[in-house]
Image (tube, coloured by chain):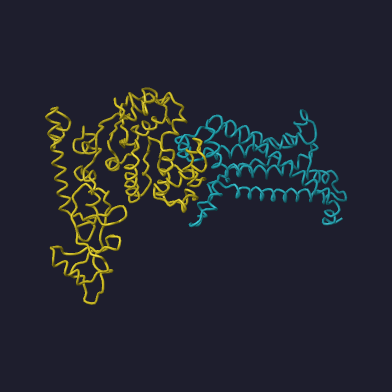
Amino acid sequence: MTDDVMISLENVSKTYRGQKAPAVENVSMTIHRGEIVVLVGPSGCGKTTTMKMINRLIEPSGGRILVDGEDVTALDGTQLRRRIGYVIQQGGLFPHMSVATNIGLVPKMLGWKRGRIEERVDELLHLVGLEPGQYRDRLPRQLSGGQQQRVGVARALAADPPVMLMDEPFGATDPLTRDRLQNEFLRLQEKLQKTIVFVTHDFDEAIKMGTRIAVLGERSRIRQFDTPEQLLAAPADETVGQFIGAGAALKRLNLRRIDSVECGDAELMGVEESPTAVLRRLDSCDADAVLTVDGQRRPLRWVGVRDLGPDQADLRGIGLPVTVVESRATLHDALDQMLTSNCGSVVVVDDDGRYCGVVNIECLMRAISEMREAARERDRGVIEASPGTPAQAVRGRR
Amino acid sequence: MTFPEYLESRRDLLLAQTLEHAYIVLVSVALATVVGVGIGVATYRRRRARAIAVAIAAAILTIPSFALLGLLIAPLGLGYLPALVALSLYALLPIIRNTVVGLTGIDPGLVESARGIGMGRLRSLATVELPLAWPVILTGIRISAQMTVGIAAIAAYVGGPGLGNQIFSGLANLGGVNSLNNALVGTLGVVVLALVLDGCLALLGVLTRPGRAAGSTASGRPRRASGARPPTVSAEPAALVSTTQGGH
């Protein structure tokens, strides 16, 4: 075992009083520093129980749990929980306290000075993308579901705990908000490098969020604990395969972000330029349209020859609207946007909405074949190393 | 003597009796609040314990007030003390009941969230659970206050203070010169006092509504009127009180 291990569960079991069958039976798992481990499984499989034993919201009946080398059962539960971030659905904010009070709760319990707490609250609100001046004094009910969730994350981060537990944190939000919250959270995590245990019943969310995914069966038995790539490419058994569901190939598009594929380029033109300049530019290259951008290089519209009228001074308001995706979005998002857009390609933008490149169906196909190539390489390695692995068995059946 | 003339001539006495009446009600409700919330807090987590607490308080409420006051004469004598004890006992039920209902009605997710971020039992109770249950508890206190104002009139029977003395002297001198005035002023005084007290407690409720301080300073977005009030369970204990009050 190396320093690298942050959380380790050793033969952990939980049997509730008055029940014969254990809710969690003999689970062992190591979680490394800085990774997001997603526990995923059908409802009632004990995944939440397993997670709650880490901060002892639920007392384990057997086995050991080590957090950063310390046996948690030897610590005071209340003190332990102040050192572990905890996020639940809708943030679990206290409705009678302002956003700032909610976020400052843990620092206050740890005895921080008031000034330091206030500073920290503002810093955290910035971090989760809420303007402190505007939101600090609001009550939770004066926030949207997504904003509440952000405050919930800020509260969990308040005392800068190395470990965070998240129990279906984005479960109660609509798909659009959920997607945005997930992206934001991943961006945060890149900076913060927390060790996170994340519980969900949504396999797509697991693929998106997880560094590694533990697919749990009944009594929290680990059916497979692997990276999302391996899980999709080689489900350990039929149950895992069923849980992954149909369209594993399509889901693999969720595993690559747009910034990891080679983007194409568009012909950019400032929106203030004249139509004749566009004609000249289109003549000099083989593109059908130019992409108009504003002063900050933010994409506006696609302008082709047909959009140009004789009496136009500049390019404002003409052409087809562009579909944009963030460079952190997945290939799946890009494909989705592409299929709904007017022109079969999407413009990639950075965090500030500035132009980065263009992705079209050829780029995607190239990326997919690369992935397939890589998976094949890996599988060949696996099969040679240990014949008769589940991976092979599954492939044989197909 | 007409009613207004009677009021004018006994102004000082009536004022003093009204204040005495209000005072004993406030003291007994305050006492019942401390004891009732204490019992509620001690029992709400255990189903059996809270059922027993509520049942005992309900049983006390069914004892006719004349009987209870009379029974208390033996150990406590006449005067202020038996009145105070009897009123406090009567005031217990709505407060215990609403404390239990208020505390058990809190979203379990919030209680767990409090535990999850490292609050101990007491801290969670003081900073999360009691503040959230407060509107419901206050409703219980209001019901108790209303009820006690009425029962306090009967406390004059054991030599207690207050407007009850007017009513009893009216009844004693039935057909006498001021008997009607006596009874009328006592009864009306009790009704007016009950209304005024309730108004004060309602105001207290508005002033202490959870999250009020933060909400009033928040700018930008108008407060949603419908969302501003936490759910109360006032209807249930109110109904319960009205059915048992016939015993007095």
Residue depicted at x 75% and y 35%: B69
Q: Quadrant of residue A86?
A: top left
- Camera-nearest residue between A256 and A262: A262
Rendered location of residue A138, percent (x, y)? 49, 50
**Residue B133, image x, y percentages:** 55, 41
Closer to us: A385 or A174: A385
- Residue sitting nearer the eye, A271 or B13: A271
Q: Is residue A174 left or right of residue B96?
A: left
Q: Residue at x 45, y 36 (%)?
A: B117
Q: Is residue A45 left or right of residue B110?
A: left
Against A211, residue B217 (above or below) is below
Q: What residue is at 20 percent from the left and 57 percent from the top? A: A345
In this view of the protein, which residue sits in the foreground, B156 or B205? B205
Q: Which chain is yellow?
A: A
Q: Which chain is cyan?
A: B
Q: x and y percent of residue A164 in the render?
A: 38, 36
Q: Quadrant of residue A60?
A: top left
A246 vs A285: above or below: above
* Image spot of residue B63 (x, y percent): 69, 35
Tell me the quadrant of the picture where the N terminus of chain B can be found: bottom right
Vertical side of B115 occupied by A14: above or below: above
Task: Report the side of A146 relative to B216 (left or right).
Answer: left
From this viewpoint, which residue is outermost toward the bottom? Answer: A311
Q: Quadrant of the C terminus of chain B?
A: top right
**Total marks placed:** 0
